[in-house]
Amino acid sequence: MAYDTELADRIRGVLLGKVDFTEKKMFGGLAFLIGGNMAVSASGHGGMLLRADPAASDELCSNPGVERAIMQGRAMDGWLRVAETTIASDETLEQWVQVGVDYARSLPVK
């Protein structure tokens, strides 16, 4: 499945003018990196793949449409899938993108 180019455009729109970022195809989607660290991605599996503080995973996953990403058969703390319905509005998309941006900024620059 190809990533949602409309979602990628919406994420790009949230980030433009607010933060320096780069784009890179990864994990079957289009990732947006801050300081070389992935913040969010328009996922090839639908919706958004989000990086977040692993310690906040339980709290973030208590929101509807948010769950840990499964990678190599394991649910991963700090790697979250956010359903398309959860980020349908520009306001909610911006809130979730900010979670990823904040976490990426907390990491050492690569």
Image (spheres, rainbow, N blue to C red):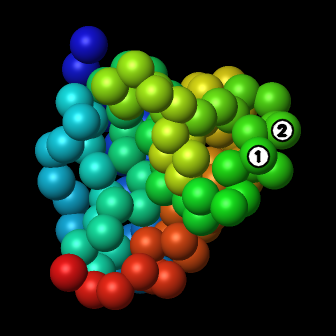
Q: Is residue 84 visible?
A: yes
Residue at 34 percent across and 86 percent down: it is 108
Q: CA separation, marks 1 and 2?
A: 6 Å
Q: Is residue 42 left or right of residue 94?
A: left
Q: Position of residue 70 (x, y in %)?
A: 46, 26
Q: Is residue 94 visible?
A: no
Residue at 59 percent across and 58 percent down: it is 54
Identity of the amino acid at label 2? Ser
Residue 35: quarter of image: bottom left
Circle 1 SS class:
helix
Near-viewer residue (5 or 57): 57
Q: Is residue 62 above or below residue 77?
A: above
- In this figure, which residue is indicated by the disc labeled 2? 62
Identity of the amino acid at label 1? Asp
Which image quarter holds the C terminus?
bottom left
Residue at 53 percent across and 71 percent down: it is 103
Q: Is residue 30 left or right of residue 9?
A: left
Crowd around label 2: few <14 · some 14–19 · many ≥20 (10 Å) = few
Looking at the image, do the residues carrying marks 1 and 2 touch, with CB atoms under 8 Å apart? yes
Number of the label disc, if any, that sits on residue 98: none
Q: Position of residue 80 (x, y in %)?
A: 55, 41
Q: Is residue 17 above or below residue 101?
A: below
- In this figure, which residue is indicated by the disc labeled 1? 58
* Nearest-to-viewer mark from 1 and 2: 1
